[in-house]
Amino acid sequence: MAGRQRAPEPEVGTTAPSADSAPAEPPIDVPLPIEQPSWREPDAPALPALMNRKRTTEKRDQEKTIRFTPTAVRIIAKEAERRGQKFAGFVGDAALAVALGKAGLVGSPEDDPIRPLVEAIEAHTVALNRIGNNLNQISGALHRGTVPEHAEAVLVGVETAVESSYQLIDRFLREGDAHGA
């Protein structure tokens, strides 16, 4: 017959716990701990949902409105999902980590020293797309047996764009090396 299990007997040389050794109640006047982010290594696997639930003893009940670009939302949402966090929780943790000095703040993308080069490449890409559209229109007209008036100007523009492309690539390589790329 299976009876009720009892607590294990203390080993020889040890004493059973007494009422005097019970843990004391924590003092009431102790300040609440400051919120610490659930900051983990970027490549750490996502924690199970139950482990992610309670990060702090302080409840997040303050709301702030933040504006993001569509690109920033896409990138942040993807990283938050990869870490198993909600968008708002990820942003809150990241902002708190920066404010507490636990994460490096590199500034906004607009402050990046290579930003002018990126903008030059974007503008150059737009110009190349326009030239490509013009070439397609000229090609279509030639297949129909006509030569558009602006064909010569477009071909000169192509030559200029090719030269500009080479200069931009050279600049990119020079400035990329200067920034450790």
Image (cartoon, grey):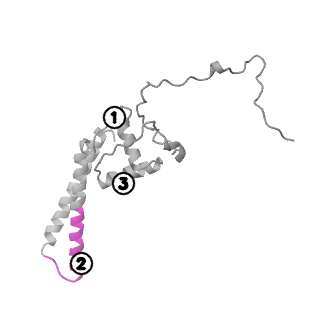
Crowd tier of the residue under label 2, counting other residues whose Cα lies within 10 Å: few below 14, some 14–19, many 20 or above: some
Q: Amino acid at mark 1?
A: Ala
Q: Residues within 10 Å of mark 1 (few under 14, many from 20)?
A: few
Query: Residue drawn 23% across and 60% down?
Result: 126
From the viewer's side, name the closer residue of 43 and 6. Answer: 6
Relative to 34, say whether 54 is above or below: below
* Residue furthest to the left: 149
Distance between mark 1 and mark 2 Cα atoms: 59 Å
Q: Which mark is residue 7?
A: none
Dot 1 or dot 2, earlier in sequence = 1
Instruction: Check residue 141 for magenta coloring.
Output: yes
Number of marks = 3
Q: Main secondary structure of the magenta part?
A: helix
Find residue 179 and report its horizontal and vertical position in percent: 30, 39
Q: Secondary structure at mark 3?
A: helix
Q: Amino acid at mark 2?
A: Gly
Q: Disc 3 and disc 2: Cα gap in Å? A: 39 Å
Considering only order in the chain, which callout, 3 or 1, is on the residue closer to the N terminus? 3
Q: Which mark is residue 140?
A: 2
Name the disc covering residue 74, or none: 3
Which span of residues is magenta-colored?
Answer: 128-148
Q: Which residue is mark 1?
A: 99
Secondary structure of the residue carrying numbered label 1: helix
- Residue 151 at x, y = what percent? 16, 72
Q: Position of residue 78 (x, y in %)?
A: 41, 52
Residue plotted at (79% across, 37% down): 4
Q: Earlier in the sequence, mark 3 or mark 2?
A: 3
Residue at image coords 46%, 49%: 82
Residue plotted at (17% across, 59% down): 160
Q: Is residue 68 magenta?
A: no
Alpha carbon of mark 1 to alpha carbon of mark 3: how far?
A: 23 Å
